[in-house]
Image: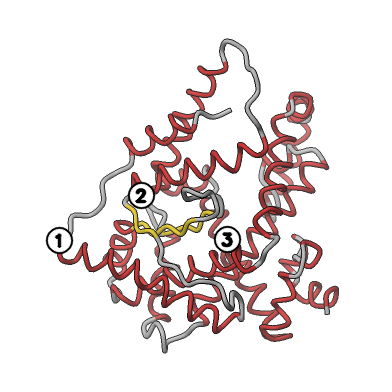
Amino acid sequence: MVDWSVAASTGAYLVRGGPVVPREEAERAVSELRELTIDAEHHVRELTGLGTGLPLLPGDVVDRPGWVRAAASGLDELTGRALPDAPGGALTPLVAGSAGVQTGVVLAFLGARVLGQYDPFGGEDKQGRLLLVAPNVVTAQRAMGVSGRDFRMWVCLHESTHRLQFTAVAWLREYFANEVANLITGLADSDGLGTMLGRLPETLKEARRAKADGSMGLAELLQSPQQRAVFDKLLAMSTLLEGHADYVMDAVGPDVVPSVATIRRRFTARRKGGGLLDRLLRSLLGVDAKIRQYALGATFTREVVRTVGMDGFNVVWTSPDTLPTRAEIRDPQAWVRRIH
């Protein structure tokens, strides 16, 4: 469906260059990011109780083209599980190449904004890779006027939490890959696509009704009941993962990040900013929806921890059956009643 080599080369070519900084400052940022991932994960383990006995490893610091290439490689690995190579028609390379160019444009847009990422399918062994995008971290820190070291530690706390989620919870990586495969297989099925398009007129009416409460987007409404069930599970899980990481990066507290309150306040304001075109692109690409996930998931985590403590919250990692549903993400006490 997508020529990922084309996506990688297109995105790496189009992504904007990073900020111009003195060499000494750049070297300090890179070395601190690499070293702080180890320190950050130590603090995350102390707070969450996850990952005891696992090795403490540094992250990989990359520039913007490096992130684009790494993201394309990870997506290739993930989607390849769902859509194994099969003989195609004469137009297959052309279609895949065109999709690769379009995907590269999206990766270039995101490559100028992503601060870091844990890719559970990245790296040479395809077993996971923690990435920190140095120019974006420096750009954000300068724009907010906050402490460089504090902000770098704060970012590392978030990404180290993601790494622990996938390395300390043995079943999570394969479960995530299987659910993505189920979703992609359903969307790629020709009969499913035809049925989806056939529902378009009715779906547009439903979308207007749903818009009032922001409950569903058009793409979601177009899905069949089976596709929506898979989508709901993925959305609930990703909201949990992002919100848990957002909760942890603040809960570690001022002893580790002295200016954490200031950073959170200014970072939240920055997430809402940008020009008209930037906001439009963020909305089209789902970035704004992702930002809402952070807040919703963090609220879920905070309320569950407040009710049953961190050990009680960690029951969420027991099996797929103990993950919150989409409805429970919005009603944390419903999850507490079901599990505890």
Q: Nearer the viewer, residue 317 or 326?
A: 317
Q: Position of residue 227 (x, y in %)?
A: 77, 41
Q: Is residue 73 left or right of residue 177?
A: left
State which tag comes first along the sequence, 3 or 2: 2
Task: For label 1, count other residues whose C-alpha is less than 10 Å away and answer few (under 14), some (14-19) or many (20+).
Answer: few
Kindly identify which residue carries mark 3: 292
Write the residue at 74% across / 46% down. 209
Kindly identify which residue carries mark 1: 23
Three-letter amino acid code of the residue under disc 1: Arg
Q: Quadrant of residue 255?
A: bottom left
Helix or strand or loop: what does disc 2 sit on? loop
**Residue at the limit of the structure toward the bottom, as seen here:** 255
Q: Position of residue 339 (x, y in %)?
A: 83, 75
Residue 14 sits above or below residue 85 on the image: below
Q: CA distance from mark 1 to mark 3?
A: 36 Å
Q: Are marks 2 and 1 in contact (CB under 8 Å)?
A: no
Three-letter amino acid code of the residue under disc 2: Ala
Kindly identify which residue carries mark 2: 112
Q: Nearer the viewer, mark 2 or mark 1?
A: 1
Q: Quadrant of the C terminus?
A: bottom right
